[in-house]
Amino acid sequence: MLLDLLLPRRCVACGRLGEAICAWCLADLPRLRGPCCERCGAPTAWPVARCLECAGRRLAFASARAAVAYLGPVRPLVAAWKERGLRHLAEEAADVIANTVERPCVDVLAFAPADGDRSVKRGHHPAERLARELALRWELPVVRALGRTRAPRPQRGLTLAERRRNVAGSFVAVSKVPARVGLIDDVFTTGATASAASSALRRAGARHIAVVTFARAIRQ
């Protein structure tokens, strides 16, 4: 309470005093409710089994869905959540997902692990916090199923092929998992990280992996 008086909250997207994400910006989030690719979740003009974005690719997950497009107020929201340590934004993100994305037919939720250096720098792990918030809303258990074999270099600025090579083999299963697993992460960009993590889950016993993220990059 005292901290709120000394440092009043401002919306991370527009700067209005009040909440960390104001009602106007929350309502303005570009929700992904329309038709999409059945496999990777890319927005499409009509439902398709495979879209141009994922056709011909070997993907280890069965489906990927996101709540919002990585555009407009979503960008500063994600940056504040991940890089500025505003952990409570995971609750807002989980609410948006629960109200936008259909609950996956899975037995447990897992999360994509961050590398150690980034977790220390941020002081928290966004994907794990999001998974635990979604677990409360979807009434599912969370398992710490994955670890890192190494810390890949940042994916930003890499081509799709470079992204795949960068994360290939960077995840390892640290526990057995049931056949149907929901894999939670904050942002789906090309699917390279989601597919690499899903491959490790398959080696741990998963047969059907549904990826769910808060945001998704949109190809133009």
Image: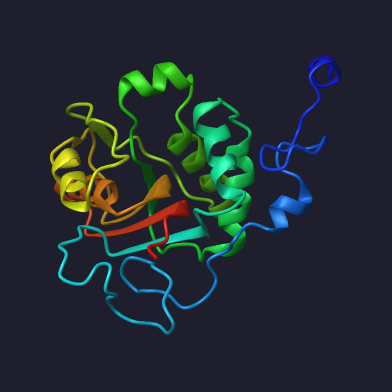
Q: Quadrant of residue 111?
A: top left
Residue sitting nearer the eye, 159 or 144: 159
Image point (56%, 55%), residue name? 97
Image point (24%, 50%), residue name? 192
Q: Quadrant of residue 204?
A: top left
- Colour basis: rainbow
Residue furthest to the bottom in view is 46
User: Where's residue 130, x and y in %?
Assistant: 50, 41
Residue sitting nearer the eye, 152 or 109: 152
Say how many tags the image has.
0
Q: Is residue 119 left or right of residue 164?
A: right
Q: Is residue 6 left or right of residue 170?
A: right
Q: Is residue 29 left or right of residue 207?
A: right
Quadrant where the image shows the N terminus: top right
Image point (38%, 67%), residue name? 41
Quadrant where the image shows the C terminus: bottom left
User: Where's residue 90, x and y in %?
Assistant: 57, 39
Q: Quadrant of residue 14?
A: top right
User: Where's residue 185, x and y in %?
Assistant: 41, 45
Vertical relation: 33 (above or below) 14: below
Image point (64%, 45%), residue name? 92
Vertical relation: 141 (above or below) 27: above
User: Where's residue 208, x and y in %?
Assistant: 26, 61
